[in-house]
Each structure stands twice: as structure tokens, then as C-alpha cells.
Image (cartoon, grey):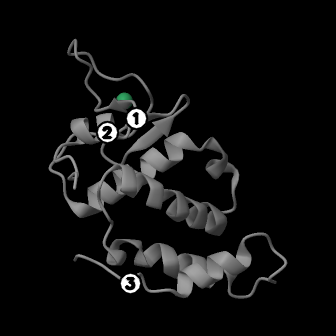
Amino acid sequence: MARRPKRYGALAKTLDVEWCRGIRSDGTYCHANSNHSMGDVTDGGVVHWADRRMEWPGLVRFLKLVVISRDPTLAKEVPWRRIYRLNMALKEVEREAHTRVPARYLRADRAFVRASVASLSNDVPMRREAFDWSRREAGKTWD
Ligand SMILES: [Zn+2]
């Protein structure tokens, strides 16, 4: 079974995403008004992300930025639906990256979605799926 790339450069290549680490190959700085340590996505789907040791919190953030770079419609969603849809799309990115985010790193997302949709009617689009997802503790984790 293929393994997750160990560096962001290789991971970006695997995921076929345009990665800007803040400094270009010619030594000049990226002029996009982007925060490379927090991470950002600009028009055209460029993921701005400073290179660093690959550790879970950063990796999760990077994978989410990849999701956002692939689907500009996420930005227009209300927060709970954006986070739910992002988490659904994250599964595909995880597959491509040969990795699986430990559940504890998505716990805050689930809690936020759960709190946001709890009082909404089931007629609200995606509300039911989002609520069900928010209540499920991800089964297998490797943390
Ligand atoms: Zn940049």
C-alpha cells in the first residue's frame, strides 16, 4: 500500500495542487497577500503554506486548504455547511494522500456543526446528514 508523502512538496505533487511556500525558486517572496504560516488559498486554487515539519495539526490544515482550493463554492456556504462539506470532501483528499486524519483533529468541527444545526429544521438542506455526521464518533483512528 502506498504511503503518505513525508514532505509538503511531495504531498502537493501527489494531490496535484499548486503549492506556494512563500519563497519562489528565484529567491523572491510571494506577493500574494497571503498568510503562509496560517495557510491560505487564492484565486486559481493556489495553496499558500510555509514549509515545516509535517505534524498532524498542520497536515490537517493543509489537507483542508487543498479541499478549499478545489471547490470555490465552499466559501459561499454558511459556516456549518461549509465545515460539513469540507469534511466530506476531505475523505477523498485523504484517500489520494494515502492518509487518514485521526478523529480527534476533527472533533472541534463536529462539535461546531452539531451546535449549529441542533435547532434547525430537517427541511434545511444537508441539515440531517450534517447532524448525523456530527454525532458519529469516527470509528477507527490511529492516534
Ligand atoms: Zn504564496
Residue located at (36% from left, 76% from top):
103
The answer to which image quadrant residue 11 occupies is: top left
For the residue marked with disc 1, what is the amino acid? Answer: Val
Give the alpha-carbon distance from disc 2 to disc 3, as whole Å: 26 Å
Q: Tell me the SS state at disc 3.
A: loop
Residue located at (40% from left, 35% from top):
17
Residue 80 left/right relative to 11: right
Give the alpha-carbon distance from disc 1 to disc 2, as whole Å: 8 Å
Residue pointed to by mark 2 = 14
Viewer-nearest of labels 3 and 1?
3
Q: Tell me the SS state at disc 2.
A: helix
Quadrant the N terminus occupies: bottom left
Where in the figure is residue 75, as x and y percent of width and height? Answer: 63, 49
Residue located at (29% from left, 59% from top):
99
Q: Who comes first in sequence, dot 2 or dot 3?
A: 2
Counting other residues with Cα less than 10 Å from the Cα at mark 3, is it few (<14), some (14-19), or many (20 or more)?
few
Residue pointed to by mark 3 = 139
Which quadrant of the frame does ligand 1 lie within? top left
Q: Is residue 33 above or below residue 110?
A: above
The answer to which image quadrant residue 98 occupies is: bottom left
Quadrant the C terminus occupies: bottom left
Residue pointed to by mark 1 = 17
Where in the figure is residue 89, as x and y percent of width and height? Answer: 52, 57
Q: Tell me the SS state at disc 1.
A: loop
Does the rendering let one see residue 116? no
Give the alpha-carbon distance from disc 3 to disc 1, as whole Å: 29 Å
Q: Who comes first in sequence, dot 3 or dot 1?
A: 1
